[in-house]
Image (cartoon, helix red, strand yellow):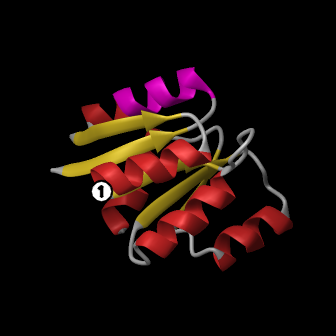
């Protein structure tokens, strides 16, 4: 069974995505609400997948992505964002995001990405 952590500063977004993922047989090991929690959860739980929002106060998704990739360069980190700017896109590529999903997202698209990774 695939395992995951879900990180977003919007509590409702975390809960909804977790429910969808669980319906698709992905076990949710942890939930977090900023980039610092993402790193702590990743280190502690070592999930197969990380679903990580980009724009969060304090510690953002860029920070967490960079640190998680330092811990495990082959980690699968799926970034979720509403930011369509080229700057964000190029920064996510530079930090080796496994995939980028744009809000509002379709759970079927997320599952397609998960299955391809």
Residue 39 percent coordinates (x, y): 49, 53
Name the residue located 26 percent from the left edge and 31 percent from the top edge. Answer: 23
- Eyeballing the image, is 90 above or below 22? below
> Which residues make up the magenta segment?
10-19
Name the residue located 36 percent from the left edge and 58 percent from the top edge. Answer: 114
> Secondary structure beneath disc 1?
loop
Q: Is residue 25 left or right of residue 39?
A: left
Residue 60 percent coordinates (x, y): 69, 49
Name the residue located 29 percent from the left edge and 49 percent from the top edge. Answer: 45
Q: Residue furthest top?
A: 12
Residue 63, picture quadrant: bottom right
Pointer 1 residue: 46
Residue 11 magenta-highlighted: yes
Residue 68 percent coordinates (x, y): 49, 64
Name the residue located 73 percent from the left edge and 45 percent from the top edge. Answer: 55
- Eyeballing the image, is 15 above or below 53? above
């Amino acid at each position: 069974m695939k395992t995951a952590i879900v990180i977003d500063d919007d509590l409702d977004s975390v809960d909804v995505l977790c429910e969808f993922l669980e319906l698709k047989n992905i076990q949710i090991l942890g939930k977090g609400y900023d980039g610092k929690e993402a790193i702590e959860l990743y280190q502690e739980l070592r999930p197969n997948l990380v679903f990580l929002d980009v724009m969060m106060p304090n510690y953002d998704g860029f920070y967490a992505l960079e640190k998680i990739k330092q811990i495990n360069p082959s980690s699968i980190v799926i970034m979720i964002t509403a930011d369509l700017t080229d700057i964000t896109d190029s920064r996510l590529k530079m930090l080796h995001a496994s995939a980028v999903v744009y809000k509002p997202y379709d759970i079927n698209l997320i599952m397609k990405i998960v299955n391809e990774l």
